[in-house]
Amino acid sequence: MTAEIPRPPEIKVEHIMTKEVFSITLGMTIREAIKLMTSHRISGAPVVDNARNVVSVMTEGDALKIAASAGLDKTVMKIIERLPKTENLVTAKASDSFADVYKLFLQHSFHRILVVDSSGKLHGIVSRANILMLLVEGPKVVAAGA
């Protein structure tokens, strides 16, 4: 007997999020952060401290502006004030529902939503692609492990 696969509104974020997240550390240079994004073909990444707590997000747009004004050799720590503050980031919890994060994507022009625990530690990311895949493929994506 197999368990019934939940319908999309009942599916939890933990079942659709990407768990292996490429992240930028405070000690990386701007050059290294850009290389990380371009080599993995991602348009942005969370910035984390040594304990993997989210401190900000850097997008391609941020990187372009920072490279032009500060150069490529400064560390992310030196330019952190130019990135969004932690308290301004919209995040989700692994226990949030698909419907909750779907609404966030509809309300904002986000490309990604970070999944954190109550202390701000990074656990995953939900991208537009994760949402679209579930909409098109349905619950079988969850059964297959997204």
Image (cartoon, grey):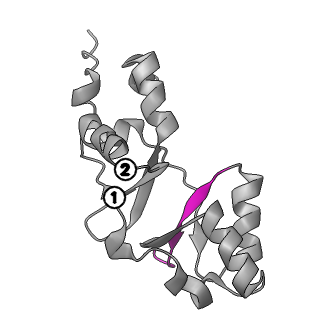
At x 71%, y 51%, the residue is 40
Residue 29 position (above or below residue 19):
below
Label for residue 91? 1
Label 1 environment density (alpha carbons within 10 Å; few <14, some 14–19, many ≥20): many
Labelled pair 2, 1 in contact (Cβ < 8 Å): no
Give yes or no for residue 49 being in the magenta stretch.
Answer: yes
Check the image and name the residue furthest to the top.
Answer: 1
| Residue 145 placement (x, y as % from top left) | 45, 29
At x 29%, y 25%, the residue is 8
Which residues are the magenta region? 42-51
Give yes or no for residue 54 being in the magenta stretch.
Answer: no
Q: CA distance from mark 2 to mark 1?
A: 12 Å
Callout 2, which amino acid?
His
At x 55%, y 54%, the residue is 21
Q: Quadrant of the N terminus?
A: top left
Figure label count: 2
The answer to whether any part of residue 5 appears in the image is yes
Q: Earlier in the sequence, mark 2 or mark 1?
A: 1
The answer to whether any part of residue 146 appears in the image is no
Q: Label 2 belongs to which residue?
A: 108
The image quadrant of residue 143 is top left
Q: Secondary structure at mark 1?
A: strand
| Residue 20 placement (x, y as % from top left) | 54, 50
Left or right, residue 125 beside residue 39: left
Label 2 environment density (alpha carbons within 10 Å; few <14, some 14–19, many ≥20): few
Q: Secondary structure at mark 2?
A: loop
| Residue 5 placement (x, y as % from top left) | 29, 18
| Residue 24 placement (x, y as % from top left) | 60, 69
Residue 45 position (above or below residue 10):
below
Callout 1, which amino acid?
Thr
